[in-house]
Amino acid sequence: MINLKEWEAKHKSIILSNEQLSFIDTEIKKNTLLIFHGFGSSSFEFYKIISDLEKHYRIVIVDLIGFGLSSKPKNYYNSILDHAQNILELIKHLNITTFSVLSHGFGTSIFCELLNIVESYALKIKIEEIFLLNGSLTIEATKNKTAQDIIENEITNKFIKITISYEFFKKYYKESLGKDDAISNEDFKILWLLQNKNNGGKVISFIDYSIKERKLYSEKWINILKLYHNNIHIIWGNNDVLSPVLSAQKLQKYLNVNKINFIEDCGHFPMLEKPKQLSEFILSLKK
């Protein structure tokens, strides 16, 4: 368990495009694991896995602009392209040229755009292992436009509801869990405070912009990620109502990945619900 003050104390920050980008960096000079959080969340969702993984990796987790402890500018469109560029600037600042990736939900779309920049400009960046969690490319791996629209409506409605009040936030967050008591009340309170710090709840209303990008660039991102299919590991909570097992199976098919590593009795947030099992999977799959 960690409190908000302790978590804030672990963060560093840099200024990019006149905004503050906050991030965790354990700075241990080992292989780097770069972590991408999902929409409406922050680096805090990964705090439970840091202690196990930092024995093997230098851990870098970014709070995307508009989330967590980073700046939350008004009328910020949450462009996936902008997020990817910001993370590229950060890894240049940290002098990181080789890293593995752990990404969740919307964070995987950002990672795909980062890959697109790397491939398009032949940047001297090497990606090692890629660990994809629940919610990864659920829209991109759905080719049917009507099905995409249904997913878009479900996602948009869910995120708008969690900004209404703490009670709604907790209610709808819990619906995404494998077990009702998988996350403590203390963690819920911190997640809520981080979401709403500096009027952050208002940023979530721009989710439709990032979804439009996900539809527009879906084929490009899937094709870019396919280039790395031998390095990809899908890790999925098997009781996820937001991104069910079928979503993982579609992703496996499109990326030509051998298997899905399921975490039992786990919903949408393996890093919070089953941190030990997630860490064990990552370390066992690490080449």
Image (cartoon, rainbow, N blue to C red):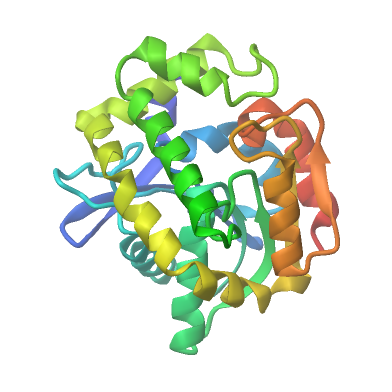
Visible residue check, residue 1 = no
Report whether 261 appears left or right of 70.
right
What is the x, y in percent for residue 145? 49, 58
> Which residue does the image show at 45% across and 49% down from the upper left?
149
Vertically, is 193 above or below 62?
Answer: above
Quarter in which the N terminus is drawn: top right
Quarter in which the C terminus is drawn: bottom right
Q: How many marks?
A: 0
Along the line of sight, the residue nearer the viewer: 34 or 119: 119
Report whether 53 appears left or right of 151.
right
What is the x, y in percent for residue 68? 35, 37
Along the line of sight, the residue nearer the viewer: 165 or 92: 165
Visible residue check, residue 141 = yes
Vertically, is 239 above or below 95?
Answer: above
What is the x, y in percent for residue 22? 34, 46
Q: Quadrant of residue 113?
A: bottom left
Which residue ends up furthest to the front in the rendered image? 146
Q: Quadrant of residue 41?
A: top left
What is the x, y in percent for residue 121? 43, 88
Which residue ends up furthest to the bottom in the rendered image? 122
> Which residue does the image show at 53% across and 34% down from the upper left?
45
Along the line of sight, the residue nearer the viewer: 70 or 208: 208
Vertically, is 161 above or below 91?
Answer: above
> Which residue does the image show at 67% across and 48% down from the upper left?
247
Vertically, is 239 above or below 35?
Answer: above
